Amino acid sequence: MSLLLQEAADKALLPIIEKVKIGERLTIDDGLTLYHSNDLLTIGQLANTFNLKRNGNRVFFIQNMYINPTNVCEAHCKFCGFRRDPGEEGAYTMNEEELLHYVEKNFQSSIREFHIVGGHNHTVPFEYYVNTVRTLKKHYPDVTIKAYTAAEIVFFSQISGLSVKEVIQELMKAGLESLTGGGAEILTENYREKMSPEKASTDEWLNTHRIAHELGLKTHSTMLYGSIESYEERLIHMDRVRKLQDETNGFLVFIPLAIQPKSKNAGIKRRTSAFDDLKTIAISRLMLDNFPHIKAYWINIGTQLTQLAMNFGSSDIHGTLTEERISHAVGALTQSALTREELVWLIEGAGRKAVERDTFYNIVKEY
């Protein structure tokens, strides 16, 4: 049977189709060919076929809760609308009582994961971040703690004097069970020098996840696309996390994140296009042949495009969230949370089988 149901309109894709058919890894040049092609349906069908072979008809989601303990941050990333300086209007740092009050107010018994990220707050010690994990694990022992980006881990190392490995070990003692995938943005120094010069370097981000994997943690990986980066830089990013995955097999999922404008009133030219979003998800699936899952992040691309993404290589649509702040601080137009029933409806509406999971993709319930 042919790999595709119809012949490709763009004949430049034929060698790539053949590579995917025989299981040969795509190169950065192959990725550029895909990005420069307007044959979106063939690219999507190719990614869909690859994903169906890997994951079948299943699409995963999780019941999770976002917690952002502080928005005070010493870094000044060009794309961020969440951060505040100490003492600035809107700046906050939750103490233990405020943290527990926030969680208690929003918690539901079905929540299986706390997703914890925040600012690089230099006004509090490393112990503050450790205690955040310890406090939540003490009061909610059955909820998985997925906390902090690799960039935050590097920052903790700087303010504590501990090595990255020692930082992760201390957090694991407190209850850390997985790292988030954030802080990656685009993993080239050309990009980072312009957009996030005060945060972890490319090598530091990758090495932090390498160390986490060596310590037994399964982690996540993101890519923030749609600003100043070239297609080649996106593909270099994918290639670098792919090489680390070859080395450690520690990543659970790759999450392309569409960058958001700093104003909700920004026009469509300030946002990524639906064409680019679907193409990037599909290319991620084809390039990252050693990643179990590619996630369609409904917070950034919206629920309807997320439905389409399930036919463009995505096998995960993230979770319920309860309250998402960071993307919405920079102009996301989507809801800040969805219910389990809404997520199931989205998946089934795309003709897929909805599967509720835990952090590590263990099946909780099939619908």
Image (tube, rainbow, N blue to C red):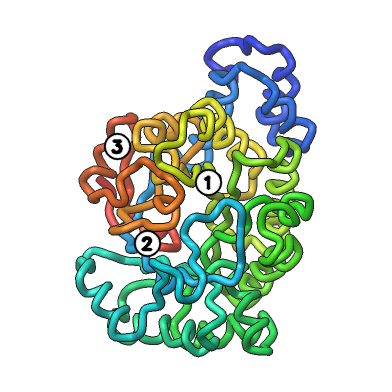
Q: Residues within 10 Å of mark 3 (few under 14, many from 20)?
A: many
Q: Which of label 2 and label 3 is nearer to you? A: 3
Whole-angstrom CA distance, mark 2 to mark 3, is 19 Å
Q: Is residue 51 above or below residue 134?
A: above
Residue 316 locus on image (x, y percent): 43, 46
Front position in the image: 278 or 253: 278
Q: Residue 259 at x, y = what percent?
A: 54, 44
Which residue bears the numbered disc 1?
257
Mark found first going from the N terminus, 2 or 3 = 3
Q: Is residue 136 visible?
A: yes
Q: Tag 1's secondary structure? A: strand
Q: What residue sits right under mark 2 in the picture?
A: 358
Give the amino acid type for the residue marked by disc 2 in the picture: Asp
Depth-wise, is mark 2 or mark 1 nearer the camera?
A: 1
Q: Quadrant of residue 155?
A: bottom right
Q: Which mark is first along the chain, 3 or 1?
A: 1
Mark 2 and mark 1 in contact? Answer it, CB < 8 Å: no
The residue singled out by tag 3 in the image is 346
Q: Secondary structure at mark 3?
A: helix
